[in-house]
C-alpha cells in the first residue's frame, strides 16, 4: 500500500525542522529578514505552496506505465507477460537487448530474444527501465534541453552502481534499489520542465557560490529536487521504499525506516559523480577527485550493517570506470533519442 497523501508533508516538515545546518542557517536568515521588515517567513511558505500546488496538477504517467506499475505489484507476473508487453514496442525491445548484452551483466552468450533478456536482467530491473523510460518520454514533450542527455547518463550509471553496491552488501534481492538509482534525481527534470526559470537560477547560484545543488535550491526556491521527486512519486503510487530512498539520497542518516537502501542510493550517487558522470556540468568538479566521507558517516553506515572503507570505495571506483569505458557507446546512450 502506498503511504497516505499527507505523508510527504511530514517529510517536508521533517526536513524543515531537521538538524541540517544549511536549513538552520536559512532559518536564521529568515529571522534576520523579518527584523529588517521583510516578511520573508510569510512569503516563502506561500511560494512553496504554489510549487506544490503545481506539482499536484501533474498528470499520472501514460497508460503503458500504469500497466508496468500493475505488473510491478503483481507477484506472479510471468516472463511471457512482460515479454509480450515489451515486444509491442520494437524500439524499446532493441534497447532492452542492448542493456542485456552489456558488460555490466557479463553474459557469455549473446542475448538475442526478449525472453532471454528478461532472465539476464530480471523482471524488476526491466520494469524499472520501462518506468524510467516513460518518465523520460513524459518530460521530453516540452524539453527545454537543459543538459538532459547528461542527466539521463547520470541516472543510468547510478542505477548500475546501485545494483553493484546492493550485491556487494548482500542486498541483491532488494528490487527497489536499481529503480531508486535510476530516478533519484528526477526532481531536477520536474524543475526544468515546470519551473524552468527558477531552475536556471538555481544552476547559476551553484556556479556563483560553488555550493551544493540542494543548498542552491533551498536558497532560490525554498524546495529541493528530492522533496519534489518524493511528492510526485508518491502521487504516482510508486512503492514507499522507492519514495523514501529518493527522498533521502542526500542524507540517508535521517531515514528512520529504510536507511540501508537510502545509504546505497546515496553512495551510488556519489560514486557516479566521482566516476565522471555528474548530473550537471556544474558538478563536474567532483569528478575524478578523491573524496572523504566523515568518520561519522562511516560509523552510521557500519551501524546499518554495511561495512565499507575508503580503500573499498577506491577499488569500486576502478571497476565502475572500467564498466563505463566499455559501455560508453552502448548502455550510456540508452535514453538518447
Ligand atoms: Fe540529487
Ligand atoms: Fe544524482
Image (cartoon, rainbow, N blue to C red):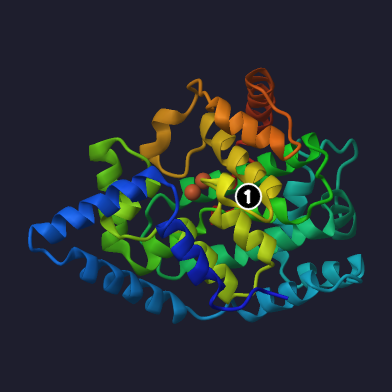
Q: Is residue 190 left or right of residue 238?
A: left
Taking 242 as reference, is 329 above or below it?
above
For this rendering, which residue is in front, 58 or 306? 306
Q: Which residue is painted at 42% across and 46% down in the image? A: 20
Q: Position of residue 67 (x, y in %)?
A: 73, 78
Q: Mark 1 = which residue? A: 181
Q: Residues within 10 Å of mark 1 (few under 14, many from 20)?
A: many
What count of labels does the image hold? 1
Taking 216 as reference, is 118 above or below it?
below
Q: Position of residue 113 (x, y in %)?
A: 87, 56
For this rendering, which residue is in front, 337 or 130? 130
Q: Is residue 331 visible?
A: no
For this rendering, which residue is in front, 281 or 259? 259
The N terminus lies in quadrant: bottom right
Residue that sits furthest to the left in the current view: 37
Q: Is residue 127 left or right of residue 332?
A: right
Quarter of the figure with residue 33: bottom left
Q: Position of residue 37 (x, y in %)?
A: 7, 63
Q: Is residue 245 visible?
A: yes
The C terminus lies in quadrant: bottom right
Q: Which residue is painted at 57% across and 36% down in the image? A: 272
Q: Which residue is painted at 77% across and 52% down in the image? A: 97
Q: Is residue 305 left or right of residue 268?
A: right
Q: Which residue is painted at 76% across and 42% down in the image? A: 166
Amino acid at each position: 500500500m502506498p503511504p497516505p497523501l499527507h505523508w510527504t508533508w511530514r517529510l517536508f516538515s521533517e526536513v524543515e525542522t531537521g538538524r541540517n545546518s544549511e536549513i538552520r542557517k536559512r532559518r536564521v536568515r529568515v529571522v534576520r529578514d523579518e527584523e529588517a521588515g521583510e516578511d520573508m517567513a510569510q512569503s516563502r511558505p506561500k511560494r512553496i505552496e504554489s510549487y506544490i500546488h503545481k506539482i499536484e496538477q501533474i498528470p499520472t504517467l501514460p497508460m503503458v506505465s500504469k500497466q508496468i506499475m500493475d505488473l510491478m505489484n503483481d507477484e506472479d507476473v510471468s516472463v511471457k507477460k512482460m515479454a509480450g508487453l515489451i515486444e509491442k514496442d520494437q524500439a524499446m525491445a532493441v534497447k532492452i537487448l542492448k542493456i542485456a548484452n552489456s558488460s555490466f551483466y557479463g553474459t557469455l552468450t549473446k542475448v538475442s530474444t526478449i525472453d532471454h533478456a528478461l532472465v539476464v536482467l530480471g523482471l524488476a530491473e526491466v520494469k524499472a527501465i520501462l518506468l524510467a523510460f516513460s518518465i523520460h518520454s513524459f518530460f521530453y514533450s516540452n524539453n527545454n534541453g537543459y543538459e538532459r542527455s547528461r542527466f539521463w547518463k547520470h541516472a543510468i550509471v547510478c542505477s548500475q552502481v546501485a545494483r553493484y553496491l546492493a550485491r556487494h552488501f548482500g542486498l541483491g534481492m532488494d528490487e527497489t534499489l536499481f529503480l531508486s538509482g535510476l530516478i533519484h534525481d528526477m526532481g531536477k527534470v520536474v524543475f526544468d520542465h515546470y519551473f524552468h526559470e527558477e531552475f536556471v537560477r538555481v544552476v547559476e547560484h551553484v556556479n556563483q557560490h560553488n555550493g551544493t545543488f540542494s543548498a542552491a535550491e533551498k536558497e532560490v526556491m525554498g524546495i529541493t529536487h528530492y522533496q519534489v521527486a518524493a511528492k510526485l512519486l508518491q502521487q504516482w503510487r510508486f512503492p514507499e521504499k522507492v519514495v523514501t530512498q529518493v527522498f533521502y539520497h542526500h542524507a540517508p542518516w535521517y531515514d528512520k525506516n529504510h536507511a540501508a537502501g537510502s545509504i546505497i542510493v546515496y553512495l551510488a550517487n556519489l560514486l557516479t559523480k566521482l566516476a565522471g558522470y555528474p548530473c550537471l556540468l556544474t558538478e563536474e568538479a567532483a569528478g575524478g577527485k578523491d573524496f572523504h566521507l566523515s568518520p561519522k558517516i562511516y560509523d552510521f553506515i557500519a551501524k546499518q550493517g554495511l561495512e565499507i572503507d575508503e580503500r573499498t570505495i577506491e577499488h569500486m571506483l576502478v571497476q565502475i570506470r572500467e564498466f563505463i569505458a566499455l559501455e560508453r557507446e552502448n548502455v550510456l546512450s540508452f535514453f538518447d533519442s
